[in-house]
Image: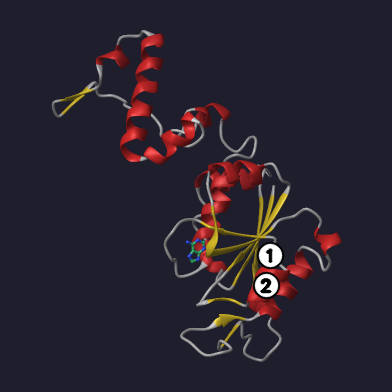
Amino acid sequence: MRFDIFTTLPQMFNGPLTESILKRAVQKGLLDIRLHDIRLWATDKHHTTDDYPYGGGAGMVMKPEPIFAAVEEVVGATREERGDTPIILLGPGGEVFNQRLAEDLARLPRLALICGHYEGVDERVREHLATRELSIGDYVLSGGEVAAMVVVDAVSRLVPGVIKAESRQDESHTSGLLEYPHYTRPAVFRDMPVPDVLIGGNHGAVDRWRREKALERTRRLRPDLVARWEE
Ligand code: ADE
């Protein structure tokens, strides 16, 4: 799967995309993650990517020209050339990203992500270039980069071969519930024992216990998920 990430801060992606699971997936050729510095498409001497807002107000707004030029060169200049590749703007005003959206996006061969910044992005990017806007939650980040990393990470681990399929079956949000509790050795740590049922070797009992615990935990922490799960 290919990701094209448009950002004014490409250095920020060192680390999250170059370590661990994503690093291995890139090495194996399962992922192709390309960073594009929007600044390179700014045509003025200072490579300006932001400007004052029309109508006044605090903060700066990302200029449309370098973003359009970058996406048009890398993904395609026309809607036909861009085909079905979603062009996703990351911003706090978007649809809230979740596991279901990650699963939908992981089925596609390619995604483009635009990292918004400053007070916002010129509305023409949202209206005429982006095909959808995603937020990673109801809080405001200092820019879309961290959000893009979250989307790339959550989508990438669903691409076949990136992690073992079994690792994903029981995890939080895949089933619609939070995950059951995990334990490893020692059987007793500082007077805190592992529940007997997990040590007993009765697989049916273990499965029942895990289902109960997942439901109990989800009821306590995320009643909204239980309501949806029961529908
Ligand atoms: N940029 C700033 N806040 C954001 C958020 N919550 N999600 C995505 N992009 C953002």
Closer-to-camera residue (119/191): 119
Identify which residue is drawn at 40% across, 32% down. 179
Left or right, 97 with reference to 44: left
Residue 23 at x, y = what percent? 56, 48
Name which residue type carries label 2: Val
Label annotation for residue 130: 1
> Do tag 1 and tag 2 residues touch (Cβ < 8 Å)?
yes
One can see residue 172 in this view: no
In the orientation shown, which residue stands out farthest toward the left?
191
Residue 102 at x, y = what percent? 59, 45
Q: Secondary structure at mark 2?
A: helix
Identify which residue is drawn at 70% across, 60% down. 131
Q: 143 above or below 170? A: below
Residue 19 at x, y = what percent? 51, 50
Residue 130 at x, y = what percent? 68, 65
Q: 156 above or below 33? A: above
Give the residue number, with chain letter if any, for mark 2: 125
Name which residue type carries label 1: Ala
Closer-to-camera residue (44/24): 44
